[in-house]
Image (cartoon, helix red, strand yellow):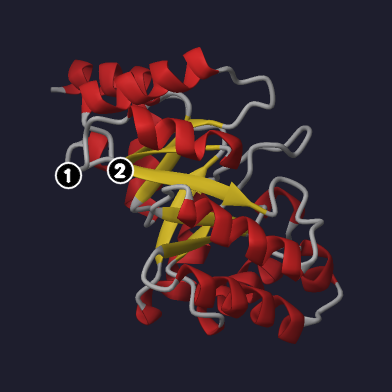
Amino acid sequence: MNTINNYIEHTLLKPDAKEEGILKLIHEAEENKFFGICINPCYVQFAKNNMSSKDIKLVTVVNFPLASNTIDTILFQTEEALKNGADEIDTVINISALKDKNYSKVISDIKKTKDVCRDNNLKVILETDLLSSTEIVEASKCATEGGANFVKTSTGFVKGGVGAKVEDVKLMYDTVKSFGLGVKASGGIKNYASAVELIKAGAVRLGTSSGVDIILGEKQYV
């Protein structure tokens, strides 16, 4: 396993985030050499202008967190985010269409979004707290057929949700591994021990606002 910092997308998606919080996030990411930061679209250009390290990826979200936008809105959001400097896009899957078993709609939305992303990574958030095991598998298959680069567990915004669970990550990994997709675990990852368990289950990215605490936890194990 690589050192834990290489897995972390240091995250600040709170609706009341301020510029000073984004600057703190950037500083912590650069200081700890995290893989990237994940922020809301309104701060992408600001973050891009204030990042000194070109090694840290700038990740943002679209169709977030309710998965309630039309595909035209999603595509506009994606194009604008990339234009403003985003390196990777995390989009929420069309949960309603998935629940209706309208898989062609789910796949179509992902494919169109990936077409806009071109060579930039697209991660599809499944929102696993709202899905059964069967639905997690079907959602992962849709992401694969749509040409996504990653499947991701959660937005972290489901009331009473657990977020990333080891069993869900393993199920996602087992579904997509032969197709070359990665798994991003996100939601409720607070400490080093839980981060390691998710990596062992198949996660190659960790979306967390507790990146610094996880790094401190890792040092205790060395």
Q: Position of residue 38 (x, y in %)?
A: 47, 39
Q: Say what secondary structure mark 1 lies in.
A: loop
Residue 7 marker: 2
Q: Residues within 10 Å of mark 1 (few under 14, many from 20)?
A: few
* Side (left or right) of 56 relative to 189: left
* Side (left or right) of 6 relative to 168: left
- Confirm whether residue 142 shows in the render: no
Q: Position of residue 88 (x, y in %)?
A: 43, 55
Residue at image point 42% right, 32% down:
47
Closer to the chain start, of discs 1 and 2, is 1
Quadrant of the image occupied by residue 121: bottom left
* Side (left or right) of 177 relative to 102: left
Q: Residue furthest left?
A: 222
Residue 2 marker: 1
56 to 94, vertically: above or below? above
Q: Amino acid at mark 1?
A: Asn
